[in-house]
Image (spheres, grey):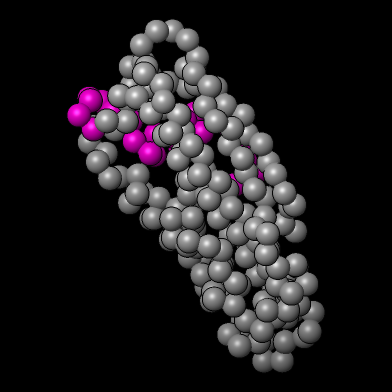
Amino acid sequence: MDERKYVEIPGSGTHELPPLLVRSAPEDAPDREAVVYLAGEIVDSEDLVESEQPSQQQKLDLALHLTDQYFRLVTHWQWGDSILEWIRQCEITFQGQEQLRHLLHKDVWPHAGRSSFVDLLLHKDVPTHGVGVEQAVGMRLTFRQPPSIACFSNQFLFYLNSSVAGTAYRTWAGLNVEHLAHFPPDRFYFQVLEMGRQLN
């Protein structure tokens, strides 16, 4: 049984929200070959291979794995950046429509918050190609821009980035959570448009 609290929207019509424009990669995203090279330096400097004399193939395999992890992080960051911009556009839309304007005011019970827009994406089953929406927003909250792979330790890329992003999102979403409510998914419509080149 669904125990979610939903905000009350006058009428029965569907409201169109701005499209979610997902930029697939930053304009200055490095190419894969450059990232593999930097990942190789991390492998050498952090002594990731347990063998006393690791083969070049072992080092290359680890560098490729680190590269995959890094591009996954950047993809999450890009989705998170796109989602936060979409939320800003939605807030502008809400302010311009009388039926929606009151929904974000904290003197209304229950009211919606910025994380309610993330919940709406989840309720709508937006296709993300394996990107976790909450983790993506958390990654964007953690980093103002996607850092170079050289900024990360192997431990961060292998194990910590998910927990850091998750903590950031939960902290952000938990602000004023006492009266936070969801948007009824059937009352909103929006498109998801993916733009730009893909990371690979």
Q: x, y (%) of residue 32?
A: 75, 67
State which quarter of the image contains the N terminus: top left
Nearer to the camera, 63 or 136: 136
Of helix, strand and loop, which mostly describes the magenta segment? loop
* Residue 155 seen in render: yes
Q: Residue furthest top?
A: 12
Q: Is residue 110 above or below residue 82?
A: above
* Residue 4 seen in render: no
Q: Residue furthest bottom?
A: 52
Q: Is residue 36 above or below residue 145?
A: below
Q: Is residue 142 above or below residue 15?
A: below
State which quarter of the image contains the C terminus: bottom right
Q: Which portion, as a residue range, is magenta?
A: 106-133
Where, by quadrant of the figure, is residue 108 drawn?
Answer: top left
Q: Residue at (33%, 17%) from the top-left corner?
A: 8
Q: Is residue 142 above or below residue 150?
A: above
Q: Residue at (67%, 50%) from the top-left corner?
A: 24
Q: Residue furthest left?
A: 107
Residue 130 shown in magenta: yes
Where, by quadrant of the figure, is residue 190 drawn?
Answer: top right
Q: x, y (%) of residue 136?
A: 52, 50
